[in-house]
Image: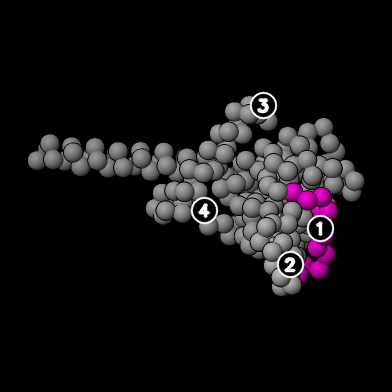
Amino acid sequence: MAFALLLVVASLAVTSMRRSILRAAGWILVVSDQVGPADIIVVSGEADGAGVLEASDLFRNGVARRVAVFSYAREVVEQEFTRRGISYQDKTARFVGQLKALGVANVEQIPTFITGTEDEGPVLARWCDEQRFNFVVVVGTRDHSRRLRRVLHRALKGHQTTVAVCSSRYSSFDPEQWWNSRDGVRTEIMESEKLLLDILRHPIS
């Protein structure tokens, strides 16, 4: 009886330790800075609908009076739809339309085209210099937020603009139980690899 009880206790301890490790692995990807009054709110490209929703909430809460989105290089699919004379709403147009539908009147488009997260940092830094912004809030998804902040902090180092990264509450990734779904496991693996690569390439960031 005592041996059986010992096995049960040991099993519970291992399970609890496993969950703690998995939760810690999930939270490694996540960061959310303190958000205060800002010159503008920017929606990161990877944030998609979750970022649009979070940005509209921040706008309604008075964090900033303006929201901006990035401009994205035209994809092959978009080009082909256009060639065939069929209207195609790209990511930029979709973000703008969704934000306006959610009540954000002042939506701006950052003019320089980007293709991914690595482009967002330098493009945002130049644009903020031109606009003379002091404080900017950038919205991203939970799983992407820590890597996004590293990219932005690198790009804005030495500039007058301070950036805060806000993790969207509408992100599908849950750091507390990501291992319970295939999408969660896939996201954890992919984003962990990208974060590790960023750390290896830029150990001081």
Q: Amino acid at mark 2?
A: Thr
Cα distance between the residues tagged 4 and 2: 34 Å
Residue that mark 4 sits on? 173
Q: Amino acid at mark 4?
A: Phe
Q: Amino acid at mark 1?
A: Gln
| Earlier residue among tags 4 and 1 | 1
Label pair 4/3, CB-CB below 8 angstroms: no
Residue that mark 3 sits on? 204
Cα distance between the residues tagged 2 and 1: 21 Å
Residue that mark 1 sits on? 109
Judge depth for marks 4 and 2 and give the one in front: 2
Cα distance between the residues tagged 3 and 2: 44 Å
| Earlier residue among tags 3 and 2 | 2
Judge depth for marks 3 and 2 and give the one in front: 2
> In the rendered image of this protein, does residue 100 appear above or below residue 178?
below
Q: Which residues are magenta?
A: 100-114
Q: Which mark is residue 138?
A: none
